[in-house]
Image (cartoon, rainbow, N blue to C red):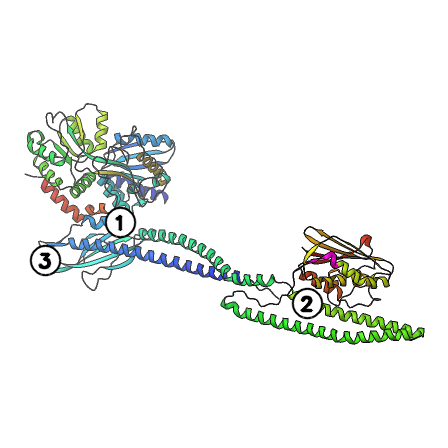
Amino acid sequence: MTVTGSIGRRLTGLLAGVAALLSVLSWWMVSELAREAAERTQDNVLAASATAIAEALRSEQGEVRLELPYSAFSMLGAIGEDRVFYRVTAGADLLTGYADLPVIPAPAVTGRVVFDTGSFDAEPIRMASVSRAVLAGTEPVPVTVTVAQTRNGVGRIAAGLSRLAAVLSVAFFAIAAILSAIAARASLRPLHEIAAAVSRRGPSDLRRVEHNAPEELAPLMASLNSLMERLGQSIRRSEDFIAEAAHRVRTPLATVRTQADIALRTVEDDAEKRRLRAMIRAVDESSRSAGQLLDHAAVAYRADDLARRPVDLSDLAAQTVAALEPAAAMKDITLGLDADAVQVRGDPVLLENAFRNVLDNAIKYSPEDTSVHIHITETGGEAHITVTDEGPGLGGGPVAALTERFRRGSNTECIVGSGLGLTIVEDVVTAHGGRVQLGAGKEGVGACVLLVLPL
Amino acid sequence: MRLACLALVTVAWATLSSALTIENHKHYPGTGDQVLRILSTADLEVFEPYLQAFRDSRPALSIDYTVVSSAELYRAIRQGAAFDLALSSAMDLQFRLANDGFARRYRSDATTALPQWARWRGLIFAFTAEPAVVVLSTDRLEGLEMPTTRQELINLLRENPDVFGGAVGTYDVRESGLGYLYATQESRSTDAYWRLTEVMGRLDPQLYCCSGRMIDDVRAGRLALAYNVLGSYAAERMARYSGGRLQILRMQDFSNVMLRTAIIPKTADQPEAAGAMIDMLARLGLRETPGEWHLPPLISSDMGDAAGFGPIRLGPGLMVYLDPLNRRAFLSEWKDAMEQP
């Protein structure tokens, strides 16, 4: 599997990116609107000023008269500290004001205010102009009032609002980024929960994953469950097959063994006897392997639905030792049992199986005339079962690998074995929530197998 | 070539100065070469302490102080006369100069400390707030009740033509920029102004160019009453000649408060020194104790509270009465009221 980035980070990044885009956009919009609003305000004030002056125009004795209203100019101070220019022309003649102020093209309709931007005395200005016909002499003359103002106030108002908008946009972005991270985490939570639920499972737990899943994860869950089911079926099938095969082999082997025994008692020839003994040993070994395969299948089957009954380990050990005493005696091996009364909860059949396999291994690999010692104690809330022998030890290879199926130690070439014994032991102990530790015996001689079971 | 240029400049300067009607002039030599040329409407006796204080802080600087009328000052700066600082009591003319681009921008901690209403665009800075007052001669008004409003003043003038005939003084608004500012602002704010002007017009009023002379004439007994006089000058005269023959009255119905303002003309050669002077004036304008200075600060406890009026607003409204059409109309009305057969 190659890890290609994180959905959470990507989601956060995308959402934050969208938020940043929106922030910039909103800042730009607010800035533009603020400028627009400030400009319109200035236009309105300029228009009001020009109109007020135009309304003060009057005709007196055939002459155009004008007295500028005070308010027409004082209102222009409302926008900011802007310079004010004005001009009033009657026809082509300047009536009053700044002669060199730029001229706005005459409005189409008299009485309508027209606006223009221009430049006066090296400063940009906004102008408003309104025309009115006033009687001069016998004819009405068009009188044009133009009021102009620099744009500093508008710029200052717009810049102030733009700064405010920038601060707000940054704050908005910061909040949005935090919320993005929270949202990404929240939307990925079901995925994490399911992953945690699946990874909490034991190694042989192949039940369906019955976790609540959002719509998007449903296909993944369905596939996972279907995979688990197929895997479970496949494992069960192969175990069934092995059990069936072992069972079918064992029965004829028992017959062969019995027949060989009888034959051994009846033949006289030493060479024949030797051959028969070799045959019997081979049959025993095969029968033992078949037994172990059956045991393994039984463990796999029973571990799925583990019984939890109180089991006295010392009793169990005593029974196992008694059962294996004849095999040990054949090699002059002494079995020593030193057990406290320790009780665990579990499946006695499986535990007996595990004990038998450990002891069987110890007897099998111990040289003649040695001893195998079993020690059961309760240490720190756990049951410790130690089996030590004086055999060749576990070889130099990796210790943990020895519990793998069909794996045998590197120094076992001359001894017949299936390599299943320690696998069964470990399966049983793990199913009970315990663990297996392998090591060298005392003073580096022999092997030491430690089974740890919770009480 | 350079000499020729210099000669030309000198000639131009001579022409300009000769065109100026100078009221007073004084040169304060410094130890260095630099000269700060100040064109001002403030009388020398009122303003000298400020100049001395500034000289103390910069002994190297020479100061050339020229006193002119506010209209002269406006005309000179508009024509490009070379001055480094223009101080005027006619805030409308000063504003117009700033608006029309004859002032140089200046900014410092002292100017930003000024209240918003005391500065405009960094071009014009107010450093005093001076009310218009009525100055009375206590000798000539013996036994008469002191007026507190314009209506009472009108009644007093009407009922005592023998006391006030030929003995009422006020600004000639055609000549004095400050007089014109006071008159126009007053006509805008109270309709009693025109009635009062008409009453004064019937009493054969004496017209003056400047506050100082009016106050001197009241002190000398030539005038019984001077209307619309700079309160700061009157207070300075009262302090100088403790005769007790002057009385200063502030009208309770309405009272103009003028801001004395400074601008650095575009033509200034010493804008840095002019800025330093503005800084000093601005700091003095914001002082909290009256001190030894003759001109009042911008914010003082006795001002504004009683009358409830702020100073004349420094804004484009000031340009309205400077418009030739408006000026002509106002002066014609004023003349009709003031000059009665």
Q: Residue furthest left?
A: B341
B334 left or right, relative to B294: left
Residue A100 appearing in the image: no
Reading the chain from its start, which is encountered first: label 1 or label 3?
1
A271 left or right, relative to B300: right
Q: Name the secondary structure under disc 3.
A: loop
For the residues marked 1 and 3, what is the alpha-carbon distance in whole angstroms?
38 Å
In this rendered view, identify the residue nearer to me: A390 or B52: A390
Quarter of the figure with the N terminus of chain B: top left
Depth check, mark 1 against mark 2: the one in front is: 2
Residue B281's x, y, as percent? 32, 35
Mark 2 neighbour class, 10 Å CA radius: few under 14, some 14 to 19, many 20 or more = many
For the residues marked 3 and 2, what is the alpha-carbon distance in whole angstroms?
123 Å
Q: Which residue is mark 3?
A: A137
Chain containing mark 2: A
Q: State the extent of the magenta-drawn residues as a range.
A: A308-316
